[in-house]
Amino acid sequence: ATSPFWTVRGAFAEELTRTPAQTEGPFYPNKLPLDTDNDLLVINDGITPAVGDITHLTGKVLDAKGNPLKNAVVEIWQCDAKGVYLHTGDSAGKKEQQDKNFQGFGRFVTGTTGEYYFRTIKPVPYPGRTPHIHFKIKQGKKELLTTQLYVKGEAGNEKDGIWKGVRNEKQRAAITVDFEKVKGSKTGELAANFVIILGVTPAE
Ligand SMILES: O=C(O)c1ccc(O)c(O)c1
């Protein structure tokens, strides 16, 4: 289920690299935040934004044939800039260091182009883990994929058991993306793009 596969569209045979599934990890929020929108930097109408490197995270969800998937629910979650997840199993002993302004979890429902957008922070290391953002893709109640996104060039990637566990090099490259400075941004905002290619073609 992890090998590359081929699809034929028009006159072109195109190799698509399926996004590998990875562990959900222990900290999918056990209690969802009141605000679950796609801006993780501000909770509801809060005035103080989260701490961290502002990142514009874009991408799209494609089915196994390479066609955009609409009505896909893209969920992300990650620890805050101090390394605290929105899960009581993690945050209970870390109340002092927790960033109360970080939403920690967000959702985006794709339209016909399959595209998604989040405003969040560049992920930071968590004890034992290289920086990463967790993703879960659903359609209705059906879970289609659970995976993780990594930062290209992070020295910690090579020591991360979960990252290293993705044995296929193309698949590993596909989940390890550039966090590039947005041209002209005076505040050093970053942009990252992550295309998600599912192993399935859900029925309409
Ligand atoms: O195995 C762990 O400890 C662990 C911690 C944090 C994560 O985000 C994760 O995916 C795994």
Image (cartoon, rainbow, N blue to C red):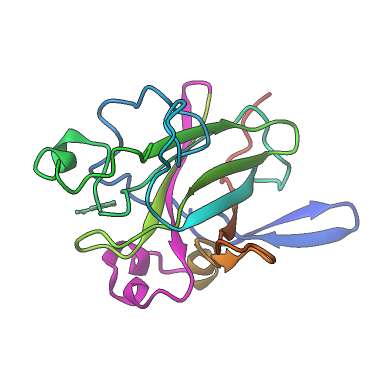
- Name the residue nearer the viewer: 39 or 105: 39
> What residue do we see at 44% from left, 62% from top?
150
Task: Relative to 86, say whether 84 is above or below.
Answer: below
Q: Quadrant of residue 91?
A: top left
Q: How many marks?
A: 0
Q: Where, quadrant-wise, is the C terminus in this rendering?
A: top right
> What residue do we see at 67% from left, 36% from top?
69
Which span of residues is magenta-colored?
A: 140-168
> What residue do we see at 43% from left, 42% from top?
49
Task: Relative to 54, say whether 75 is above or below.
Answer: above
**Left or right of 53, for residue 187:** right
Task: State the image coordinates of residue 115 (x, y, percent, origin top left).
Answer: 67, 41
**Left or right of 127, for residue 105:** right
Task: Relative to 8, say whether 139 is above or below.
Answer: above
> Please, which residue is most extreme toward the left here?
93
**Left or right of 148, for residue 86:** left
Task: State the image coordinates of residue 41 (x, y, percent, origin top left).
Answer: 45, 42
- Name the residue nearer the viewer: 183 or 114: 183
> Please, which residue is most extreme toward the right here?
11
Task: Relative to 72, say whether 160 is above or below.
Answer: below
> What residue do we see at 40% from left, 55% from top?
52
Q: Quadrant of residue 118?
A: top right
Magenta span has 173?
no
- Name the residue nearer the viewer: 92 or 107: 92
Magenta span has 155?
yes
Task: State the image coordinates of residue 76 (x, y, percent, origin top left).
Answer: 44, 41
Task: State the image coordinates of residue 130 (x, y, percent, origin top left).
Answer: 32, 65
